[in-house]
């Protein structure tokens, strides 16, 4: 008995996205830029960007590599305008070698918070992903790969983030979207 419904790979796109963000006191920007491949036919590839306005209290910037999956999208053009990057976040990324003991203590505390948060997020995401795949509703899943790089601290809320498809490629050629 298969774990996933038949045809799921043809309706799933996976790839990488780079997230770059910057915040100056009350306002900032976060952008995603990446490429995804159709898991059922890897000759089909699409590039995309997303720009998110962020509001809240923060200072600094960071860059992070992410895995990204689009579930239940047989036609990638249906991803155009899907919500990405909207919602709240708390971030802390400082070069520990420059801050000594204080930096190590703060980073250790933040890593503990982040681990606990990631565990509860993983459970919620697994439930959401299973629900999305089983109901056929389009769904975007983003997971960081490793640590972010930068100097940043803040609590922000992102608004207005949506997928903007740039280029679609197949074995027969490419199309600018």
Image (cartoon, rainbow, N blue to C red):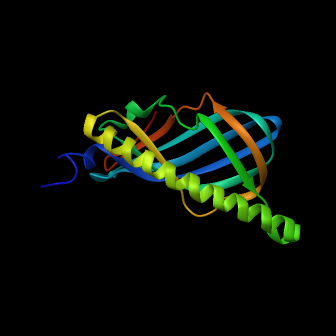
Could you say where residue 54 lies in the image, as x and y percent from the top left? Answer: 71, 34
Q: How many marks?
A: 0
Could you say where residue 100 lies in the image, as x and y percent from the top left? Answer: 87, 71
Q: Nearer the viewer, residue 175 or 123?
A: 123
Position of 81 compared to 129: left or right? Answer: right
Q: Nearer the viewer, residue 175 or 54?
A: 54
Q: Is residue 83 above or below residue 115?
A: above
Is residue 172 among what the camera can see? yes
Q: In this view, does 67 lie above or below 80?
A: below
Q: Which of 156 and 35 is in front in this view?
A: 156
Position of 170 compared to 48: left or right? Answer: left
Could you say where residue 152 lies in the image, as x and y percent from the top left? Answer: 78, 52
Could you say where residue 90 lies in the image, as x and y percent from the top left? Answer: 69, 45
Is residue 46 among what the camera can see? no
Which residue corresponds to the image point at 57% horizontal and 46% vertical from the top-left? Answer: 33
Q: Quadrant of residue 115?
A: bottom right
Which residue corresponds to the image point at 21% horizontal and 53% vertical from the top-left? Answer: 3
Which residue corresponds to the image point at 61% horizontal and 27% vertical from the top-left? Answer: 160
Q: Nearer the viewer, residue 90 or 120?
A: 120
Position of 116 compared to 7: left or right? Answer: right
Task: Identify the residue at the far left of this view.
Answer: 1
Quadrant for the N terminus, please: bottom left
């Amino acid at each position: 008995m298969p774990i996933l419904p038949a045809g799921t790979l043809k309706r799933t796109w996976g790839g990488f996205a780079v997230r770059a963000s910057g915040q100056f006191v009350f306002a900032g920007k976060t952008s995603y830029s990446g490429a995804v491949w159709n898991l059922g036919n890897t000759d089909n590839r699409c590039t995309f960007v997303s720009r998110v306005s962020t509001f809240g209290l923060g200072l600094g910037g960071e860059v992070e590599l992410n895995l990204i999956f689009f579930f239940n999208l047989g036609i990638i053009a249906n991803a155009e305008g899907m919500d990405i990057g909207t919602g709240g976040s708390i971030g802390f990324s400082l070069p520990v070698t420059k801050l000594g003991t204080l930096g190590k203590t703060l980073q250790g505390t933040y890593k503990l918070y982040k681990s606990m948060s990631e565990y509860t997020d993983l459970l919620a995401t697994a439930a959401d992903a299973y629900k999305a795949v089983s109901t056929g509703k389009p769904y975007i899943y983003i997971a960081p790969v490793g640590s972010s790089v930068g100097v940043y601290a803040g609590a922000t809320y992102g608004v207005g983030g949506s997928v903007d498809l740039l280029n679609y490629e197949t074995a027969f050629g490419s199309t600018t979207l």
